[in-house]
Image (cartoon, rainbow, N blue to C red):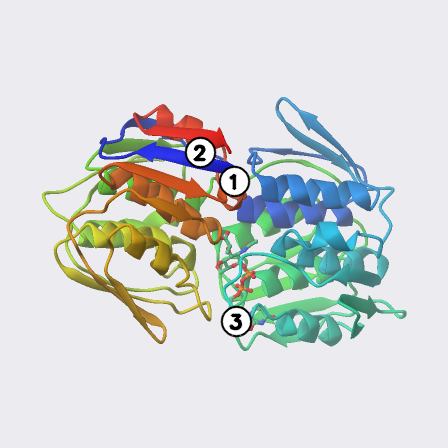
Amino acid sequence: MQKYIIHGGKPLSGGIRISGMKNAALPILFATILASGKSVLHNIPDVSDVHAAIEILRSVGAEVIYRPDGIEICTDSVSPGIAPYELVQKIRASTYLMGAELGRFHTTRVAMPGGCDFGQRPIDLHIKGFEALGASIQLSSGYVCGEAPNGLFGSEIYFDTISVGATVNLILASVLSDGITVLDNAAREPHICDLANFLNACGARITGAGTSVIKIKGVDKLHGVDYTVIPDMIEAGTYMVAAAATKGKLTLTDIIPKHMDSVTAKLIQAGTVVEEGINSLTVSSGESIRGIQIKTLPYPGFPTDMHPQFSVLLSLSDETSTITEGIWENRFRYADELCRMGANITVNGKTATIKGQGGLCGVPVKAVDLRAGAALVVAGLAAEGRTEISDVGKICRGYDHLVEKLRDVGADITLVET
Ligand code: EPZ
């Protein structure tokens, strides 16, 4: 088993280049199934979720070559319905194979997906959307099977809940359909815009991405392109919190500051100093960490994927804060591990109350999911003493060269095999 050993209490200082966004790279990787010929994708992060997606693409017939400057993909030989159950189970993003297969082949057979465990992770909105386009969907022995023998036709689709995954999947399923599809109450995340920009570069006709109404005019064919993926706003947010939590000063480069607005606003409210550059942010700790109230919401609201990391920062305050989880059924599994380090977090329904203790203490803890694990890294960096984090494979799903990046700015963190 792999573990991180962190000796905390050292202020982080220096510069970190932010990698490409995992949650933008994943939909775009599956979207290449819809384009004929070769695509070359740049700024793809070196994280295990991306490697798992590439394994799935290769398993269905895609040719994928890792180049020094990016990833070259040709999906001309891809066949539908053959992705191995055990590969699909690894990541949540494998749901996107459904939309891509339906969009190109009018048939799909994909195992129910995996992903972080926040309680229920339904795909009813995906299925409702596929059916609105004319597909018939059956769930049988752990697989989602879809057929559209007469093809897919544009439709008006309203999402009862704002869903990143359902928005992605319905864009993939409709870009090659007949007619116009309107997605109403669509997700507005930057990675939805990135997917739309990629597909439009391939010849698609998508308008409104980034707003809650997205229109897709089906086209006959898409061609491969060269494309550079946007920077990872959650990776950036995690390092912003780490700078504040360790009383350090970090400059994050190759980012889009606009994407960080809600995170920046909450950090400033908590007393952190944030200076904005054209494609950089410099974050340094303030005099003290103030107690604040946070509610996680769909973009442009405060991102749920920054919830666990902020609970660490607020545990270092001398004041009381609350975080209300507006997206997931149960995203509080991180709290027990943080309480081992001396945090005082009580969860009541959807709200965690964090009574700041002014500091944390390094002890052995366990990463229960991707962002909970990232939060424990931040906690270990801020804590006095030695923190040992097990099950770090969950963290490697979404953080590119985490140990190297942190060591470059003064962290005492080591990856050990036990
Ligand atoms: C994506 O998950 C991200 N994953 C998650 O990030 C992120 O937390 C989430 O969006 C919200 O921003 C990837 O992009 C790979 P949703 P997704 O569909 O698409 C409900 C990380 O840390 N819902 O937007 O699965 C659902 O239960 C990961 O990188 C339905 O009810 O999330 C939830 O309450 C963790 N029916 C809400 O919508 C559906 O059919 C939002 O889920 C689909 C979703």
Residue 145 visible in the picture: yes
Name the side, left or right, on which 5 lies relative to 38. left
Camera-side mark, 2 or 3: 2
| Mark number, residue 396 | 1
Considering only vertical position in the picture, is 25 above or below 323? Answer: above
Query: What SS does tag 1 mark?
Result: loop
Disc 1 residue type?
Cys
Name the side, left or right, on which 57 lies relative to 76. left
Residues at discs 1 and 3 in contact (Cβ within 8 Å): no
Whole-percent x and y of residue 111?
75, 61
Q: Nearer the viewer, residue 44 or 212?
A: 44
Q: Earlier in the sequence, mark 1 or mark 3?
A: 3
Gap in Å between the C-alphas at discs 2 and 3?
35 Å
Residues at discs 1 and 2 in contact (Cβ within 8 Å): yes
Residue visible at 19% across and 54% down in the picture: 269
Name the side, left or right, on which 48 lies relative to 222. left
Residue 200 visible in the picture: no
Q: Residues within 10 Å of mark 2 (few under 14, many from 20)?
A: some
Camera-side mark, 1 or 3: 1
Disc 3 residue type?
Asn
Disc 2 residue type?
Leu
Q: Nearer the viewer, residue 6 or 307?
A: 6
| Mark number, residue 402 | 2
Q: Earlier in the sequence, mark 1 or mark 2?
A: 1
Name the side, left or right, on which 9 lies relative to 180. left
Gap in Å between the C-alphas at discs 1 and 3?
32 Å
Q: Residues within 10 Å of mark 3 (few under 14, many from 20)?
A: some
| Mark number, residue 185 | 3
| Mark number, residue 304 | none
Query: What SS does tag 3 mark?
Result: loop
Whole-percent x and y of residue 278?
34, 35
Q: Nearer the viewer, residue 155 or 147?
A: 147
